[in-house]
Image (cartoon, grey):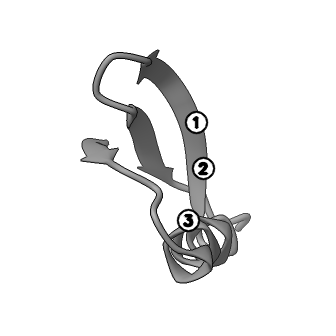
Amino acid sequence: MMLMATKIRYPKDRDFYETLKNEFSVEQVHYDQATDVILYRIKRKREEL
C-alpha cells in the first residue's frame, strides 16, 4: 500500500491514475480545497490463483 499526493493539472495526470487502475486499486482518500491537492491510497490488486 502506498499513498500518493498530487495536483491534477493536465489530462495526462488524470490518465496516469486511470491507467493505474488496471493493476492497482486506486482510492481517493482526501481532497484539500485550499491547495487543490488530492491524496490517493494505492494497493496492488490480488491475483486469483
* Neighbourhood count class around disc 2 (C-alpha, 10 Å): few under 14, some 14–19, many 20 upward: some
Mark 3 to mark 1 CA distance (whole Å): 10 Å
Which of 35 and 15 lies nearest the eye of the viewer? 35
Left or right of residue 38, residue 34 in this image: left
Q: Quadrant of residue 19?
A: bottom right
- Judged left or right of residue 49, residue 17 is left
Height in image: 18 above or below 39? below
Q: Secondary structure at mark 1?
A: strand
Labels 2 and 1 touching (C-beta < 8 A): yes
Give neighbour class at mark 3: few <14, some 14-19, many 20+ (Cα, 10 Å). Answer: some
Q: CA distance from mark 2 to mark 1?
A: 7 Å
The C terminus lies in quadrant: bottom right
Alpha carbon distance from label 3 to label 2: 10 Å
The kind of residue on which mark 3 rests is Tyr
> Marks 3 and 2: which is nearer the front?
3
Question: Which residue corresponds to mark 1?
Answer: 27
Do the numbered discs 3 and 1 sit on residues whose CB atoms are within 8 Å?
A: no
Residue located 58% across and 36% down the image: 27
**Secondary structure beneath label 3:** helix
